[in-house]
Image (cartoon, grey):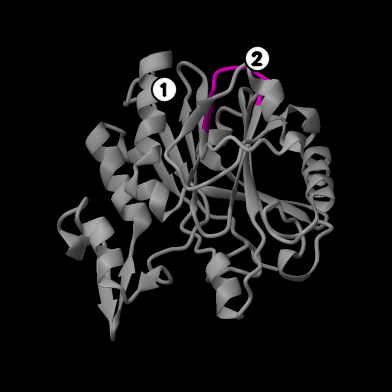
Amino acid sequence: MSNFNNEEILHVKKGDFEYLQFKKLNKYSDRLFHAITLRHGGVSSGEYNSLNFRVSGKHSKENVLKNLNIVCEKTNIDNEKIYKAKQAHTSNILILDNKNKEEYKFKNFNKDEYDGYITNTVGIGALVTVADCNCIVIYDPVNNVVANVHSGWKGTVAKIYENAINLMQKKYNSKMEDIIVCFGPSIRKCCFSSKENSFKERFTSIWKNESEYISYKEDRFFIDLVYVITRDLLELGIKEENIIDSKICTMCNSNDFFSNRASKKRNSDEFGTFALVTMLI
């Protein structure tokens, strides 16, 4: 069993259930709870083994709800306070508050398309699911506002993380110098590759100086998504010391985290997802 403890990450194990936390965010643990689940300790089987949160595949929604209950029981969170819409690789951000939260309860499987959430309300737990995409916590400790963001390559090209930060700035008066941004496990440059020049151009048309984030090996190119997001964050005015990276590749560590590409490498069309949960407490 892997151990992901390092200077940035705390790896918590409670029996078979495991999750990660950012040490920088744990300085505010009296106000903010966050957890990134590993794939262990759930009830799912096959490609979804075992703590799966994906409801769009062939796996039963009933088992997903059982997995959510496991997470909530192990972390002392009320499962009635977990909220989620449908993820669709958009740049859409939902502001969750006491006025709209009921329709987005996890168990409702709401079909509205949002890939990020912002709240300044205590007791609202936002959940995003990932299987290679970036899961990002954006926290303003001064105004006590948190964003939970799912940013795959499509969301990255659409700069969903900038949408979240701009909303935090506009609605809650968040300041760039206060904001903390943390990257959870995701597919990294070592594994995120393609042969299609048209795909590469989706990135080079936005981020110039491609040699900074694209490398080549034989007939393939490899793209560093965390690098381009980080570059954007620095340009926005986020402090370098407030940008924290788990440095964990989901494909390299697919025994511990769900990975879409790892499943495809095994010639499977099915894959599970792990979760990032954030909640002001």
Q: Residue 141: horizontal and vertical position, in percent?
A: 48, 22
Q: Which residues are magenta?
A: 117-124
Visible in this render: residue 281?
no
Visible in this render: residue 48?
yes
Eye-nearest disc, 1 or 2: 2
* Quarter containing the N terminus: bottom right
Q: Looking at the image, which is closer to me, 241 or 133? A: 133
Task: Pick whichever of labels 1 and 2 is earlier in the sequence.
Answer: 2
Residue at image position (39%, 38%) is 161
- Above-or-below relation of 178 to 39: above
How many marks do you count on the picture? 2
Magenta segment's dominant SS is loop
Q: Residue 251: horizontal and vertical position, in percent?
A: 53, 69
Q: Looking at the image, which is closer to me, 127 or 188? A: 127
Residue at image position (76%, 59%) is 59
Q: Secondary structure at mark 2?
A: loop
* Quarter containing the C terminus: top right
